[in-house]
Amino acid sequence: MQNPRVALALPNPGDVIGGKYAVTRRLGEGGMAVVFEATHIRLRQRLAIKVQKPDVPEFEQSLARFEREARATAQLRSIHAARTVDVDTLPNGLPYMVMEYLEGNDLDVQLSTHGAFPIDQAVDVALQVASAMQEAHALGIVHRDLKPSNLFMCPVGDRLVVKVLDFGISKIENDGDARLTASDAYFGTPAYAAPEQIRDAGNADARSDIWSLGIILFELLTGRTPFEGSAVSVIAKVMTDPIPWPITLRPDLPPDLARIMLHALERDPRARFQTMKEMAEALAPFGPARSAATLVADAQRGRGRLGEILVAEQLITQADLELALAEQRSSGKLLGRVLLDLGLVAHSDLLIALAKQQGIGESPAPPAIVERKRAERHVSTVPPMSTPRATPKRRWLWIAIAVGLPLGILCGVGASLSMSNHAPPVSSPVGR
């Protein structure tokens, strides 16, 4: 008998989801989801919307992974983790996630196009990933699938800002769902997976992500991974073969940097760096003087304050802003938190305004395709309801998700938000 979910309709260009997200085009699809480009109608901000495919095998398990990614990313606040705007369900029951739309491409494309990176740029990428994963590990989240295609590179000036994607197979402490962490289930990609993860995916911990980052850095600096071949042969090599001495593949590497890589790639997890912070501190002397986070914060200063953006877009009145600023002065809270507490702005609109402050995904005008296709198809607005990856050669990518009120994300922009007196700044795909 045919699966009744197969008949469930995905959105089409011209549809308006949740009363505010106008779908403009289909970006692509992975094994589990389809990704669309959309525009926030009022803010004219480009976004990516990921919708669960109705006809995937083992739909319930796929949905559980979809939700797991939401739970993981909802807690992350680093500018190097993908920002989620909203999550809900379509009227037909298919879940969707609204994410910031990022310009650029993934690290896999960069490596395929340009080969090995200059030393300081390679270390810069590793430091940014380590920054995101320090926070994730502190929250009990192990990614388990760090690899170049899950690292999205956004150009900001003459630098690339890294966003870690795809927490769909992450391990979350105290999650309680054995179906997704069973010891006999292999998760990850063989060339980047740690030996202990290959033996027992359920026992992967933060040090497994350190191994994966060590492999990524090895590839960034030498143009290849330590172990190559078929999946089966790579697994065997990961478990038994010695790690090639990096300087034999790139003679200009500093010996101390080569030793740092090998320290991250010790087969015994107890012999590796024990935390991402330790690894980042060892790498720092080989990276750039200014962090990417500082660069993003500097870029934000010229784009106006958050309150000014909200008033200009008529999301709040000037009187509302003055009320919120007065409360902020007395409470010491971030402006975004005050606006939410007072019920003056929707959390999804606030997050999009924060992204607009950074200049991410901004559209100069409402796309004509939306109005044209809506007129052609007489599309009615979909009311809000309560209740992977594409080929790496594309020049776009979208990112992951959150569930419920993403307070963790709002708090997470705190460091950059506080750089303006009364207007917190922010940080700025395809799925499995």
Image (cartoon, rainbow, N blue to C red):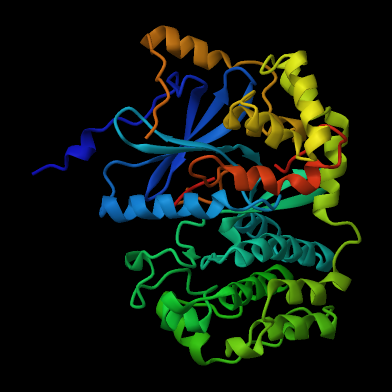
Picture residue at 69% right of the left edge, 82% below the top? 273
Residue nearer the viewer, 229 or 46: 46
- Looking at this rendering, what residue extends furthest in the front direction? 330
Q: Quadrant of residue 264?
A: bottom right
Residue 324, percent across and down? 75, 26
Identify whether 234 is placed above or below 85. below
Number of marks present in the image shown = 0
Identify whether 398 is placed above or below 214. above
- Looking at this rendering, what residue extends furthest in the left direction? 1
Identify whether 215 is placed above or below 412. below
Asked whether, in this view, residue 233 is left or right of residue 133, the answer is left
Instruction: Answer yes or no: is residue 424 visible.
Output: no
Identify whether 165 is placed above or below 194. above
Picture residue at 22% right of the left edge, 33% below the top? 7
Q: Quadrant of residue 34?
A: top left
Q: Quadrant of residue 101?
A: top right
Picture residue at 77% right of the left edge, 30% below the top? 327
Residue 210, percent across and down? 63, 75
Residue 348, percent across and down? 58, 31
Residue nearer the viewer, 221 or 51: 51
User: Where the N terminus falls, by quadrant?
Assistant: top left
Residue 200, percent across and down? 41, 80
Residue nearer the viewer, 289 or 243: 289
Instruction: Answer yes or no: is residue 67 visible.
Output: yes
- Looking at this rendering, what residue extends furthest in the right direction? 289
